[in-house]
Amino acid sequence: MGYTDTVSKAREVLAHKFWELLHDECRDGCVLGIGTGTTIEFMLSYGVRRGYVGLLRRCILFCSSIRSEMYLRKIGLKAASLTFVDDLDIYVDSADEVDDRKYMIKGGGGAMLREKVLCSLSRKKYFFVDFAKRSAMIGEKKFVPIEIEYVALPLLAKFLALHGYRYEVRNAKAKYGPIMTDNNNLIVDVYTGALRDPETFDREIASIPGVVTTGIFTPKHVTMIFVGYPDRLEIID
Ligand code: 5RP
Protein backbone atom coordinates (compact mmCIF):
# COMPACT_ATOMS: atom_id res chain seq x y z
CA MET A 1 0.00 0.00 0.00
CA GLY A 2 1.40 3.45 -0.93
CA TYR A 3 1.48 6.45 1.42
CA THR A 4 -1.70 8.01 -0.02
CA ASP A 5 -3.58 4.73 0.34
CA THR A 6 -2.51 4.25 3.96
CA VAL A 7 -3.59 7.82 4.81
CA SER A 8 -6.95 7.21 3.07
CA LYS A 9 -7.40 3.98 5.03
CA ALA A 10 -6.54 5.82 8.25
CA ARG A 11 -9.10 8.49 7.39
CA GLU A 12 -11.76 5.80 6.93
CA VAL A 13 -10.97 4.53 10.43
CA LEU A 14 -11.29 8.11 11.72
CA ALA A 15 -14.53 8.73 9.84
CA HIS A 16 -16.09 5.64 11.39
CA LYS A 17 -15.21 6.97 14.86
CA PHE A 18 -16.33 10.50 13.95
CA TRP A 19 -19.88 9.38 13.14
CA GLU A 20 -20.05 6.94 16.03
CA LEU A 21 -19.16 9.79 18.38
CA LEU A 22 -21.70 12.17 16.88
CA HIS A 23 -24.43 9.51 17.01
CA ASP A 24 -23.62 8.93 20.70
CA GLU A 25 -23.22 12.54 21.78
CA CYS A 26 -25.42 14.74 19.55
CA ARG A 27 -28.89 15.39 20.87
CA ASP A 28 -31.55 17.38 18.97
CA GLY A 29 -30.56 21.05 19.04
CA CYS A 30 -26.91 20.22 19.78
CA VAL A 31 -24.62 23.15 18.98
CA LEU A 32 -21.78 21.83 16.91
CA GLY A 33 -18.62 23.56 15.68
CA ILE A 34 -17.13 22.31 12.43
CA GLY A 35 -13.44 22.80 11.68
CA THR A 36 -11.67 23.28 8.38
CA GLY A 37 -9.60 21.13 6.03
CA THR A 38 -9.47 18.02 3.92
CA THR A 39 -9.83 15.66 6.90
CA ILE A 40 -13.03 17.25 8.14
CA GLU A 41 -14.42 17.30 4.59
CA PHE A 42 -13.53 13.61 4.29
CA MET A 43 -15.48 12.93 7.51
CA LEU A 44 -18.49 14.80 6.16
CA SER A 45 -18.44 13.17 2.72
CA TYR A 46 -18.14 9.74 4.38
CA GLY A 47 -21.35 10.62 6.24
CA VAL A 48 -23.04 11.80 3.05
CA ARG A 49 -22.25 8.47 1.33
CA ARG A 50 -23.76 6.52 4.22
CA GLY A 51 -26.78 8.75 4.80
CA TYR A 52 -25.64 9.94 8.24
CA VAL A 53 -25.86 13.71 7.72
CA GLY A 54 -29.56 13.87 8.67
CA LEU A 55 -28.18 13.94 12.20
CA LEU A 56 -26.55 17.29 11.48
CA ARG A 57 -29.86 18.77 10.29
CA ARG A 58 -31.06 18.53 13.88
CA CYS A 59 -28.01 20.50 15.13
CA ILE A 60 -27.06 24.17 15.04
CA LEU A 61 -23.82 24.33 13.07
CA PHE A 62 -21.06 26.92 13.25
CA CYS A 63 -18.06 26.76 10.92
CA SER A 64 -14.47 27.87 11.43
CA SER A 65 -14.09 29.15 7.85
CA ILE A 66 -15.89 30.42 4.80
CA ARG A 67 -14.62 27.28 3.02
CA SER A 68 -16.40 24.99 5.52
CA GLU A 69 -19.56 27.09 5.32
CA MET A 70 -19.50 26.62 1.54
CA TYR A 71 -18.81 22.89 1.87
CA LEU A 72 -21.80 22.48 4.21
CA ARG A 73 -24.00 24.28 1.71
CA LYS A 74 -22.78 21.93 -1.03
CA ILE A 75 -23.94 18.91 0.97
CA GLY A 76 -27.30 20.48 1.80
CA LEU A 77 -26.55 21.88 5.26
CA LYS A 78 -26.43 25.44 6.51
CA ALA A 79 -24.05 27.08 8.95
CA ALA A 80 -25.32 29.69 11.39
CA SER A 81 -23.74 33.13 11.39
CA LEU A 82 -20.78 33.53 13.72
CA THR A 83 -22.37 36.81 14.85
CA PHE A 84 -24.63 34.65 17.02
CA VAL A 85 -22.05 32.17 18.28
CA ASP A 86 -22.11 31.46 21.99
CA ASP A 87 -21.42 28.26 23.93
CA LEU A 88 -21.03 25.13 21.83
CA ASP A 89 -21.60 21.52 22.88
CA ILE A 90 -19.04 19.87 20.62
CA TYR A 91 -16.24 21.04 18.33
CA VAL A 92 -14.79 18.66 15.72
CA ASP A 93 -11.70 19.35 13.64
CA SER A 94 -8.32 18.04 12.51
CA ALA A 95 -4.80 19.43 13.00
CA ASP A 96 -1.48 19.60 11.18
CA GLU A 97 0.66 18.04 13.90
CA VAL A 98 -0.11 16.60 17.34
CA ASP A 99 1.93 15.16 20.17
CA ASP A 100 1.15 12.94 23.14
CA ARG A 101 1.25 15.92 25.52
CA LYS A 102 -1.93 17.14 23.70
CA TYR A 103 -0.23 20.05 21.99
CA MET A 104 -1.23 20.66 18.41
CA ILE A 105 -0.26 22.84 15.47
CA LYS A 106 -3.17 24.10 13.40
CA GLY A 107 -3.64 26.66 10.67
CA GLY A 108 -2.31 24.78 7.65
CA GLY A 109 -5.61 25.84 6.09
CA GLY A 110 -5.27 29.34 7.52
CA ALA A 111 -8.36 29.08 9.73
CA MET A 112 -6.81 28.89 13.20
CA LEU A 113 -8.33 32.06 14.61
CA ARG A 114 -11.94 30.95 14.18
CA GLU A 115 -10.91 27.40 15.06
CA LYS A 116 -9.46 28.57 18.36
CA VAL A 117 -12.52 30.71 19.12
CA LEU A 118 -14.97 27.88 18.41
CA CYS A 119 -13.03 25.22 20.27
CA SER A 120 -12.53 27.55 23.26
CA LEU A 121 -16.30 28.08 23.42
CA SER A 122 -16.97 24.37 23.22
CA ARG A 123 -17.62 21.98 26.09
CA LYS A 124 -16.07 19.02 24.23
CA LYS A 125 -13.29 19.35 21.67
CA TYR A 126 -12.48 16.37 19.45
CA PHE A 127 -9.67 16.23 16.91
CA PHE A 128 -9.15 13.62 14.18
CA VAL A 129 -5.72 13.17 12.66
CA ASP A 130 -4.03 10.47 10.61
CA PHE A 131 -0.89 8.79 11.93
CA ALA A 132 1.43 10.91 9.75
CA LYS A 133 0.56 13.98 11.82
CA ARG A 134 1.71 12.52 15.14
CA SER A 135 5.16 13.36 16.46
CA ALA A 136 7.11 13.25 19.69
CA MET A 137 7.05 17.04 19.97
CA ILE A 138 5.11 19.48 17.82
CA GLY A 139 7.24 21.58 15.50
CA GLU A 140 9.26 18.54 14.41
CA LYS A 141 7.30 18.17 11.21
CA LYS A 142 5.38 21.37 10.59
CA PHE A 143 5.83 25.13 10.72
CA VAL A 144 3.78 27.19 13.18
CA PRO A 145 1.37 29.57 11.41
CA ILE A 146 0.89 32.99 12.98
CA GLU A 147 -1.99 35.25 12.02
CA ILE A 148 -1.10 38.92 12.17
CA GLU A 149 -2.42 42.32 11.34
CA TYR A 150 -0.42 43.54 8.37
CA VAL A 151 1.27 46.31 10.42
CA ALA A 152 2.75 43.78 12.87
CA LEU A 153 5.10 42.23 10.32
CA PRO A 154 8.25 44.30 11.11
CA LEU A 155 7.93 43.71 14.86
CA LEU A 156 7.30 40.00 14.45
CA ALA A 157 10.19 39.74 11.96
CA LYS A 158 12.56 41.36 14.51
CA PHE A 159 11.46 38.91 17.21
CA LEU A 160 11.92 35.91 14.91
CA ALA A 161 15.34 37.10 13.71
CA LEU A 162 16.47 37.63 17.32
CA HIS A 163 15.55 34.03 18.13
CA GLY A 164 16.96 32.62 14.90
CA TYR A 165 13.67 31.35 13.49
CA ARG A 166 13.26 31.09 9.72
CA TYR A 167 9.87 32.24 8.46
CA GLU A 168 7.82 32.91 5.33
CA VAL A 169 4.86 35.15 4.75
CA ARG A 170 2.32 32.72 3.29
CA ASN A 171 1.68 33.44 -0.36
CA ALA A 172 -1.48 32.81 -2.33
CA LYS A 173 -1.44 30.24 -5.14
CA ALA A 174 -3.77 31.98 -7.58
CA LYS A 175 -2.95 35.57 -6.69
CA TYR A 176 0.40 37.31 -6.83
CA GLY A 177 1.04 38.19 -3.21
CA PRO A 178 0.21 37.08 0.31
CA ILE A 179 -2.96 35.25 1.25
CA MET A 180 -5.47 37.18 3.31
CA THR A 181 -7.32 35.10 5.90
CA ASP A 182 -11.11 35.08 6.35
CA ASN A 183 -10.40 37.84 8.88
CA ASN A 184 -8.36 39.94 6.41
CA ASN A 185 -5.03 39.25 8.05
CA LEU A 186 -1.67 37.87 6.92
CA ILE A 187 -0.17 34.53 7.91
CA VAL A 188 3.49 34.07 8.75
CA ASP A 189 4.71 30.45 8.82
CA VAL A 190 7.53 29.96 11.33
CA TYR A 191 9.97 27.02 11.27
CA THR A 192 10.60 26.42 14.95
CA GLY A 193 11.82 22.84 15.06
CA ALA A 194 10.63 20.63 17.95
CA LEU A 195 8.99 22.80 20.62
CA ARG A 196 9.91 21.66 24.11
CA ASP A 197 7.86 24.50 25.62
CA PRO A 198 5.10 25.46 23.16
CA GLU A 199 3.24 27.60 25.73
CA THR A 200 6.16 30.00 26.25
CA PHE A 201 6.66 30.34 22.50
CA ASP A 202 2.93 30.98 22.09
CA ARG A 203 2.83 33.55 24.92
CA GLU A 204 5.86 35.46 23.65
CA ILE A 205 4.56 35.64 20.09
CA ALA A 206 1.01 36.50 21.20
CA SER A 207 2.33 39.45 23.24
CA ILE A 208 3.71 41.18 20.12
CA PRO A 209 1.35 44.03 19.18
CA GLY A 210 -0.69 43.15 16.11
CA VAL A 211 -0.33 39.39 16.45
CA VAL A 212 -3.85 37.99 16.34
CA THR A 213 -3.19 34.38 17.26
CA THR A 214 -0.80 31.49 16.70
CA GLY A 215 -1.52 28.00 15.39
CA ILE A 216 -0.42 26.48 18.70
CA PHE A 217 -3.25 24.72 20.50
CA THR A 218 -2.59 23.63 24.07
CA PRO A 219 -4.15 20.85 26.17
CA LYS A 220 -6.85 23.30 27.31
CA HIS A 221 -8.12 23.34 23.71
CA VAL A 222 -8.37 19.56 23.54
CA THR A 223 -10.66 16.93 25.01
CA MET A 224 -9.42 14.00 22.91
CA ILE A 225 -7.32 13.49 19.83
CA PHE A 226 -8.18 10.44 17.72
CA VAL A 227 -5.22 9.19 15.72
CA GLY A 228 -6.14 6.99 12.78
CA TYR A 229 -3.92 4.21 11.45
CA PRO A 230 -4.89 1.99 8.49
CA ASP A 231 -5.80 -0.85 10.86
CA ARG A 232 -6.61 0.83 14.19
CA LEU A 233 -7.46 3.91 16.18
CA GLU A 234 -5.41 5.34 19.04
CA ILE A 235 -6.65 7.97 21.45
CA ILE A 236 -4.63 10.75 23.05
CA ASP A 237 -6.67 11.59 26.12
C1 5RP B 1 -6.95 24.57 9.13
C2 5RP B 1 -6.48 23.54 10.06
C3 5RP B 1 -6.68 22.12 9.67
O1 5RP B 1 -7.33 21.44 10.70
C4 5RP B 1 -5.37 21.48 9.44
O2 5RP B 1 -4.66 22.30 8.53
C5 5RP B 1 -5.53 20.08 8.87
O3 5RP B 1 -5.92 20.14 7.56
P1 5RP B 1 -6.09 18.83 6.69
O4 5RP B 1 -7.22 18.08 7.28
O5 5RP B 1 -6.39 19.34 5.31
O6 5RP B 1 -4.81 18.06 6.76
O7 5RP B 1 -5.94 23.78 11.11
O8 5RP B 1 -6.62 25.85 9.57
Image: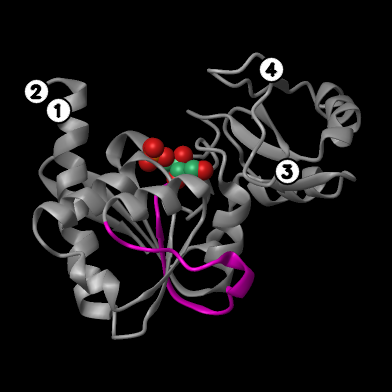
- Name the spot of residue 126 as percent of width and height, x first: 38, 63
Residue on which the image places disc 1: 5
Question: In the image, which residues are magenta?
Answer: 76-96
Q: Between residues 163 and 63, which one lies in front from this camera angle?
A: 63
Residue on which the image places disc 3: 201
Mark number for residue 177? 4
Quadrant of picture, ligand 1: top left
Asked whether the viewer can see residue 99, the reply is no
Of the residues shown, which amino acid type is indicated by label 2? Met
Number of residues whose C-alpha sits closer than 10 Å to that of mark 1, classed few (under 14), some (14–19) or many (20 or more)? few
Tell which tag, 2 or 4, sits nearer the viewer.
Answer: 4
Tell which tag, 3 or 4, sits nearer the viewer.
Answer: 4
Of the residues shown, which amino acid type is indicated by label 3? Phe
Number of residues whose C-alpha sits closer than 10 Å to that of mark 2, classed few (under 14), some (14–19) or many (20 or more)? few
Q: Quadrant of the N terminus?
A: top left
Residue on which the image places disc 2: 1
Residue with the most extreme top position: 176
